[in-house]
Image (cartoon, rainbow, N blue to C red):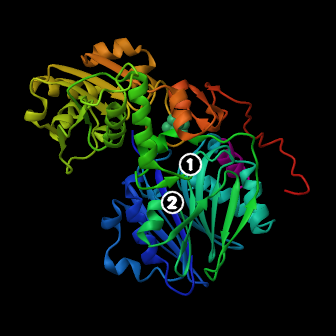
Amino acid sequence: MTEKCGVVGVSLDGRDAARPLYYALYALQHRGQESAGIVTHDGFQQHSHVDMGLVGDVFGEGDLDPLAGSAGIGHVRYPTAGSVDTSCAQPFSVSFKSGSLGLSHNGNLVNADEIRDELAAVGHAFTSDGDTEVIAHDLARNLLEEDLVRAVKRTMGRIHGSYALTISHDDTVLGVRDPQGNRPLCIGELEDGYILASESAAIDTLDGELVRDVRPGELVVLQEDGDGFDSYQLVEEDNTAHCFFEHVYFARPDSVIDETLVYEARRNLGRKLWEESGVETDVVMPVPDSGRAFASGYADAATETTADGEARAEDDDGVEFAEGLMKNRYVGRTFIMPTQDERERAVRLKLNPIKSTIEGKTVTVIDDSIVRGTTSTQLVQLLKDCGAAEVHVRIGAPEIVAPCYMGIDMATREELIASDKSTEEIRDAISADSLAYLSTDAVADVLGKERLDLCLGCVTGEYPYDIEGEETDRDVQRPQLASRQLSADD
Ligand code: SF4
């Protein structure tokens, strides 16, 4: 699995926005490593610097100075829809009759092609195959007829899917979250202005204070003097559809999403994992770094109760938490290796076991997910080669049985090991002594949400959006574009 994208926007009182945006993008780098960019506006004209690569590669010292203006937006991208080249790198910027627009998008529209066809039929020329340009063109068209707030509302009534957007309209910066709040977006206060960002870690980096999450269906407009922000609740839905994988995998552990510190959520998921499927072994160890918080919570819960749920005797310390696998931080993610053979070799390059922690011991190894099963198979083999007496695998999330259409580059259904295999068949395939996943009810419980307020599409096969050929878990309909009648309050 690869992260989606990170978005940011700031409006400051007189100070140039480029450098704070640059630091914020560094804080969001884990959300996308393919391209990075910043668009600013100085009150007269828009400035843009966007290129392929990591933030540190895209911006040299001389690249920030020309980005004048105290308002701007930024983006780091991992491609989910559209090509892997500069035509889809963001922020997307465009000038049109009533000003200039910059747009940063995290998420994925499921009806982008319909809107693109409709706009192309009335003369809009597209330079990319990405869905961000579709939103930008739709908004630009609506801005010719409406004020800013009504134009955004009209666009929100036409696009269907997941989106957290930061938008610059001349020197006004806006943030929008889709009506079900699938992707995160939060507001922070800085010493001399306000910031919108995918994760609160970006606010921390700028010494700011997290104010709150942008609400699902809300438009937030940062005031141009950095003095505050205005809020417009443009769309309201009965249920939200927060991506539960943000808490499990994507977000930084030091970010706060939906008022919950991600690290704490992961530890609590680990505690649940012990309650649901704990196994008494000599040691429990994380797959670094993804399994660390889960393993810490799991081991912590194991000091209090036995695997059978009984209170632990005073002289029984439970399962020892140990770091038994060391990660080589200079190897890229195995998932971006193009062939299966290269992926398999990459696991051995990435993880090295500590023999003294493992040899002759029964081991529980904890991770956050199993996608194709390649990593888990290699890992179990690695531990057994190192002399582990038993290897038990515990996963801090339910089985991934279906792909993601909301902006996560996961794998195709055929590639997902759990799409057609039972837990026992997967255990057998990865040669573990036992295997257990966390239940979806446990996830909802730990996150303090009703199941219907979460997106669980990839683990249930039922999605919160109307996706062609897939089931939905709620009553949703994609907008009927051609037949849509604009109402008076649009
Ligand atoms: S399908 Fe899975 S990864 Fe995608 S948004 Fe839903 S929960 Fe998140």
**Is 408 situated above or below 466?**
below
How many callouts does the rendering have?
Answer: 2
Which is nearer the N-term, disc 2 or disc 1?
2
Quadrant in the rendering for residue 242: top right
Give the image location of residue 259, x and y in percent.
56, 53
- Residue type at tag 2: Val
Q: Quadrant of the N terminus?
A: top left
| Residue at the image position 80 percent from the left and 66 percent from the top | 146
Residue behind label 1 places its C-beta within 8 angstroms of ligand 1: yes
* Residue designated by label 2: 7
**Is residue 36 shown left or right of residue 356?**
right
Q: Is residue 115 magenta?
A: yes
Query: Residue 183: which disc?
Result: 1
Instruction: Residue lying at the far bottom in this picture: please name it.
Output: 14
> Residues in magenta?
114-123
User: Label 1's element?
Assistant: loop
